[in-house]
Image: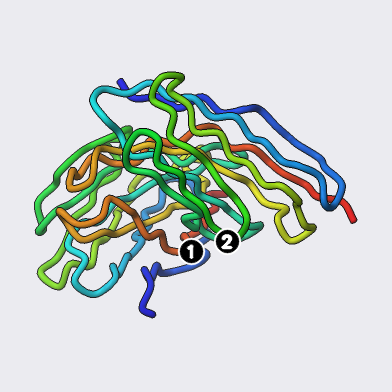
Amino acid sequence: GDSVTQMEGPVTLSEEAFLTINCTYTATGYPSLFWYVQYPGEGLQLLLKATKADDKGSNKGFEATYRKETTSFHLEKGSVQVSDSAVYFCALSGPSGSARQLTFGSGTQLTVLP
Amino acid sequence: AAGVIQSPRHLIKEKRETATLKCYPIPRHDTVYWYQQGPGQDPQFLISFYEKMQSDKGSIPDRFSAQQFSDYHSELNMSSLELGDSALYFCASRPFGGANVLTFGAGSRLTVL
């Protein structure tokens, strides 16, 4: 079945540091890939997505590229801010138009220190 | 913009009691998903509905049931509550056949004492 393996946390960085959170997946067919972010006490918010190989999703300075050859979707940000402190979940689902539910990774807690 | 509405936001129950959570999807979204997130855990898929019919089933206990109504809102009913049911329950919605992006509600936090 589908699975997502995510870099374990917690990750602690200083403000303006470079961020990478690794994510690899196992899935049949051509899944869509997502990063969701969860701030303390809040729900899951979509951060970015990619629906086919070599697509790059980007939002709020975060980027991730769908790499089919390495089955990866690593999250990166060049300069993190204190406000980026949250839990980040990598997830996959079926191709566009399918109703397959999301499968989440285990989440990575990011803390950014001033 | 309208979002996914969940109620109640917080619920405290005793063991063996029953709880009902409600989810109101975004207008014109006809597919609803329920997820359970235990403390420090990733969200686990419970069940989904499309056009009032169950479309997929995940790790939902037999003590739980859910349905989607004609106005597309959904309810998750949990009976014989156990301490381990304490979790954040998320509902998400999407338009069927549309972009494969789920929009999540803020969640309902259930505490079982």
SS at badge 1: loop
The picture quadrant where one finds residue A106 is top right
Position of B77 with respect to B30 (left or right) is right
In the drawing, what numbered circle is on residue A107? Answer: none
> What kind of residue is marked 2?
Glu
Position of A3 with respect to B95 (left or right) is right
Q: Residue at x 87, y 51 (%)?
A: A113
Name the colouring of the figure.
Answer: rainbow
Q: How many numbered dots are placed on residues in this image?
A: 2
The picture quadrant where one finds residue B102 is bottom left
* Subunit ID for the residue under disc 2: A
In the drawing, what numbered circle is on residue A42? Answer: 2
Q: Are marks 1 and 2 on the same chain?
A: no
Q: Residue at x 52, y 57 (%)?
A: B109
Tell me how far mark 1 sits from mark 2, CA to CA. 6 Å
Give the percent coordinates (x, y) of residue A37.
Answer: 56, 52
**Position of B80 relative to A59 (above/below):** above
Give the percent coordinates (x, y) of residue A60.
Answer: 60, 60
> What kind of residue is marked 1?
Ala
Give the percent coordinates (x, y) of residue B95.
Answer: 20, 61
Q: Residue at x 33, y 65 (%)?
A: B22
**The furthest residue to the right:** A114
Q: Residue at x 30, y 34 (%)?
A: A31
For the residue pair B100 and B70, the one nearer the viewer reads as: B100
Position of B101 with respect to A23 (left or right) is left
Q: Residue at label 1? A: B106
* Subunit ID for the residue under disc 1: B
**The furthest residue to the bottom:** B1
Q: Are marks 1 and 2 in contact (CB under 8 Å)?
A: yes
Position of B67 with respect to A68 (left or right) is left
For the residue pair A18 and A23, the one nearer the viewer reads as: A18
SS at badge 2: loop
